[in-house]
Image (cartoon, rainbow, N blue to C red):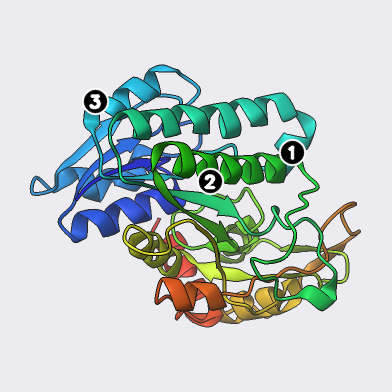
Amino acid sequence: MKALVTGGAGFIGSTLVDRLLAEGHAVDVIDDLSSGSLANLSDARSDSSHALTFHQIDIRNPGVADLIARRQPDVVYHLAAQADVRVSVANPVLDAEINIIGSLNVLEGARQGGARKVVFASSGGTIYGDPDPSALPVRESHPQVPVSPYGVAKKAVGDYLAAYRQLHDLEFTALALANVYGPRQDPHGEAGVVAIFAGRLLAGEPCTVFGDGTQTRDFVFVDDVVDAFARAAEKGSGLVINIGTGVETSVNRLYATMADGAGVSDDAVRAPARPGELLRSSLDPGRAGIHLGWKPWTTLEEGTAAVLRWFRDR
């Protein structure tokens, strides 16, 4: 298979690239390196047996469509994004330029290049808005009523994917990701708390918990997520599919687990709750089990231990 990964130098994208290369696929990576890093691809690039080509370009550049069309991938994995909800609120135009216009450039390239499928990284934490706790874990049948420009953009791209499927027979699967964490992650974004805690615990610095720490997220390990992307190349067509654990993990539990893993006995520092923060979140992964044959397998203890090891090795 010829695969193309946008955002392929990022945290999730580079882990996906490693998986695709390990399976023997030829991979093109598109990344502007605004948040990704070539260091994430160092192992992949140093192996001469790998069919890997890197292209440094912003997906807002209309030339992206021509580039993808020329490379003629079978499957496009679209992960490149402006991924910070707070940035989308402060600068919704920038968010739309990257996440909507940029995505349309990618879809046009996929269409013109004869790709058979686009696998899109959507956001399970934002497309469903602020669901009532009684709806947790959220299923894909829940109304999509995003309350941030970032969530609006992710929903819009999902709608464009459905339109391209009807108009141009371009298949898609949209993976609505929970709070992905793991090695190579930077400390920004919803799951960045894992990276923040890891860095501070290993440096002997105090960690801050905002509010009472009972707010929950659905933390899913990056290797598990990448397995879902790999499966979606052949399965789950025409669907939005949640990729999460279905388990709510409180920030208090996360801190206790990571402090224990780092051998730290100090309590976290408490700070006032952040205004507007979502109090509870989790995604029902049942559809992924049915249509992708996927389920998460990495426990919070195993996953956070891997993050701590990665930070130590740095």
Identify the residue at image location x=38%, y=61%: 232
Q: Secondary structure at mark 2?
A: helix
Q: Nearer the viewer, mark 2 or mark 1?
A: 2
Residue 47: % across, % down: 13, 48
Residue on which the image places disc 2 = 162
Q: Quadrant of residue 52?
A: top left
Identify the residue at image location x=70%, y=71%: 138
Q: Nearer the viewer, mark 3 or mark 2?
A: 2
67 or 266: nearer the viewer: 67
When the figure is inspected, residue 75 is found, relative to residue 95, above or below; the finding is below
> Nearer the N terminus, badge 2 or badge 1?
1
Q: What amino acid type should be assigned to the residue bearing mark 1?
A: Pro
Q: Quadrant of residue 32?
A: top left
Identify the residue at image location x=48%, y=43%: 166
Residue on which the image places disc 1 = 149
Q: Which mark is residue 225?
A: none
Question: Is 59 displayed left or right of 25 in the figure?
Answer: right
- Label 3 neighbourhood size at 10 Å, few (<14), some (14-19), many (20+)? some
Residue 264: % across, % down: 63, 77
Question: Is 139 displayed left or right of 208 in the figure?
Answer: left
Q: What amino acid type should be assigned to the residue bearing mark 2?
A: Ala
What is the distance, in whole Å, between disc 2 and disc 1 at their CAs?
Answer: 20 Å
125 or 128: nearer the viewer: 128
Residue 276: % across, % down: 88, 52
Q: Secondary structure at mark 3?
A: helix
Question: Is 20 displayed left or right of 122 in the figure?
Answer: left
Residue on which the image places disc 3 = 70
Identify the residue at image location x=66%, y=71%: 139
Q: What amino acid type should be assigned to the residue bearing mark 3?
A: Arg
What is the distance, in whole Å, between disc 3 and disc 2 at their CAs?
Answer: 24 Å
Tag 3 and tag 2, C-beta contact below 8 Å: no
138 or 303: nearer the viewer: 138
